[in-house]
Image (spheres, grey):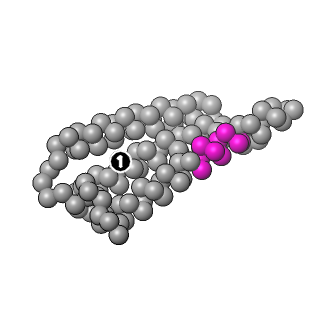
């Protein structure tokens, strides 16, 4: 297995740390906004989208843990790709569920 380049660096890669910090802050803001929208709407599609955006925050945490030496390169790689799959599944589920509710003559959420 090939090592992940940024997981194996000996020193601090300042541009990478800054990019990771920016990604972490942005994903936290997005996740917070999505959770706020969910709390206002209280519908399943909003929850699914909030969870999908939460995977972006989880990816930043995984990358930070890897840079800090808490995760091995192969574990980091598998976790990030696993989070990609979870995010895609949550977005697809949100769209599918929203479409099924839109097709319902009653138009109710059912949640």
Q: Extreme right residue here?
A: 105
Picture coordinates of residue 83, whole percent (x, y): 47, 54
Picture coordinates of residue 104, whole percent (x, y): 83, 36
Q: Residues within 10 Å of mark 1 (few under 14, many from 20)?
A: many
Query: Which residue is found at the position 18% from the left and 57% from the top?
Result: 9
Query: Which residue is found at the position 37% from the left and 65% from the top?
Result: 75
Quadrant (top left/top right/bottom left/bottom right) for the C terminus: top right
| Occupied quadrant, residue 29 | top left
Q: Is residue 96 magenta?
A: yes
- Give the residues drawn in magenta, as a range: 89-97
Quadrant (top left/top right/bottom left/bottom right) for the N terminus: bottom left
User: What number of labels is visible?
Assistant: 1
Residue, disc 1: 60
The answer to whether one can see residue 71 in this image is: no
Query: Which residue is found at the position 39% from the left and 38% from the top?
Result: 28
Which is the main secondary structure of the residues drawn in magenta? helix
The answer to whether one can see residue 14 in this image is: yes
* Residue 69 position (above or below residue 54): below
Q: Report whether 2 appears left or right of 42.
A: left
| Occupied quadrant, residue 37 | top right
């Amino acid at each position: 297995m090939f090592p992940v380049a940024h997981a194996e660096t000996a020193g601090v890669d300042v541009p990478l740390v800054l990019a990771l910090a920016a990604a972490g802050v942005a994903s936290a803001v997005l996740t917070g906004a999505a959770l706020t929208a969910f709390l206002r709407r209280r519908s399943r599609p909003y929850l699914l989208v909030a969870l999908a955006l939460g995977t972006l925050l989880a990816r930043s945490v995984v990358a930070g843990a890897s840079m800090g030496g808490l995760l091995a390169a192969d574990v980091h790689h598998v976790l990030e790709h696993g989070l990609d799959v979870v995010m895609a599944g949550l977005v697809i589920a949100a769209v599918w569920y929203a479409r099924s509710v839109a097709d319902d003559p009653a138009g109710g959420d059912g949640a």
